Image: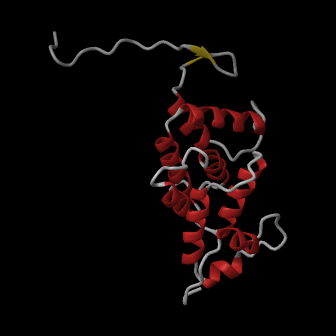
Amino acid sequence: MSKFNKTIPKRVPTTINEMGEKAYQLSAKEELVSTCLTTFLQSSYYESENEIVERIKKAASQVDTDFVAKTALYLRRDANMRSVTHLLSGELAPRLSGKEYGTRFFTKVAQRPDDMSEILAYYFSKGNRKIANAIKRGFKVKLESMDPYLIDKYKMAKKEISLVDLVNLMHPKGTQAN
């Protein structure tokens, strides 16, 4: 008989999955991470793109802001996922107002100018008219630190939000390097 190494009680499935089989219920954090890591925001066999987006938004709303921000940074920097990161960043923008790390988050999550335009496009598609200050400050810092190669490569002239629009909205100061 062991005194310290206790036997773990057997877990039983608590829900039914899409196939009609028994499955384990995921917590909101587990749901957010697993859904984000396994989707390109495209329709799959079991669910449409809109259902996937709604599932991510629901899970993100149930989880604290810090965890969602760290998840978005992990997805962009380590997993090299873009669309899901843009979705999470757009959802986080109102929640990051007043947070001391809001500016740093948007500076780090936007690695290229097209990341910034995608995040803004999603943010505006939600019906927002005014850009959150965290987005403005973060994108301004990122634009000021970009090298001429990135600026020239990502002009996005044929997009709804081009590099010129980003510069006009964020008002970055030019440096000797760019």
Residue 94 drawn above or below residue 153: above
| Image quadrant in which the C terminus is located | bottom right
Where residue 101 appears, as percent x and y from the top left, is 46, 55
Where residue 94 appears, as percent x and y from the top left, is 61, 46
Q: Residue furthest top?
A: 1
| Image quadrant in which the N terminus is located | top left
Residue 19 drawn above or below residue 69: above
Q: Quadrant of residue 47?
A: top right
Where residue 118 appears, as percent x and y from the top left, is 71, 58
Residue 35 drawn above or below residue 7: below
Residue 112 drawn above or below residue 105: below
Q: Nearer the viewer, residue 109 or 39?
A: 109
Which residue appears at 54% of the width and 76% of the height?
145
| Left or right: 5, with 55 as reference point | left
Q: Quadrant of residue 48?
A: top right
Which residue appears at 75% of the width and 52% of the height?
129
